[in-house]
């Protein structure tokens, strides 16, 4: 059997098919162009995502270091405040300096003298 060859000229309804084929090819080119654009966008977004992940990790490490330093500084501040409170604390209220103190022999006994009238009151 001889092979049948296809006709290069479309039959009567072929003009419509050729127009449809051309429109489909044009749409295919547009879709391929859009696909390439989207692939480039995906690649760019993946790179940006990777960069942001690295930056996020660095910031987490920095945050952890700052938290440790903050805790260390808080304890150091508490220690300094404690030392300041200890330095300002008086051993006894209204204590006199040793040079201004009266010797024990010159001190009077506490309280009111015998036979002395009480203080004036109204």
Image (cartoon, grey):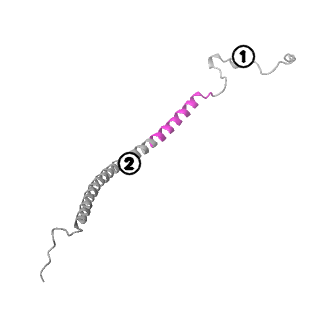
What residue is disc 1 on? 106
Q: In which quarter of the image is the N terminus?
A: bottom left
Image-based side of 97 in relation to 63, left or right: right
Q: In which quarter of the image is residue 83?
A: top right
Q: What residue is at 55 percent from the left and 30 percent from the top?
A: 84
Q: In which quarter of the image is residue 87?
A: top right
Image-based side of 73 in relation to 47, left or right: right
Q: Circle 2 — which element? A: helix
* Residue at the left extreme of this rendering: 2
User: Height in image: 55 above or below 80?
Assistant: below
What residue is disc 2 on? 57
Q: What residue is at 15 percent from the left and 71 percent from the top?
A: 7
In x, y percent, where is residue 95? 65, 23
In x, y percent, where is residue 66? 43, 41
Camera-side mark, 1 or 2: 2
* Residue at the front extreme of this rendering: 12
Q: Quadrant of the C terminus?
A: top right
Tell me where the magenta segment starts and ends, as one range.
Answer: 68-90
Q: In which quarter of the image is residue 99?
A: top right
């Amino acid at each position: 059997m001889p092979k049948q060859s296809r006709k290069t000229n479309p039959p009567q309804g072929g003009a419509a098919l050729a127009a449809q084929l051309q429109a489909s090819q044009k749409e295919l080119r547009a879709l391929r162009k859009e696909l390439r654009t989207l692939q480039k966008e995906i690649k760019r977004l993946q790179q940006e995502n990777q960069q942001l992940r690295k930056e996020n990790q660095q910031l987490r490490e920095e945050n952890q270091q700052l938290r440790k330093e903050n805790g260390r500084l808080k304890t150091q501040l508490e220690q300094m405040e404690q030392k300041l409170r200890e330095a300002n604390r008086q051993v006894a209220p209204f204590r006199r300096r040793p040079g201004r103190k009266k010797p024990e022999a010159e001190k009077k006994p506490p309280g009111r003298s015998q036979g002395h009238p009480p203080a004036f009151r109204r």
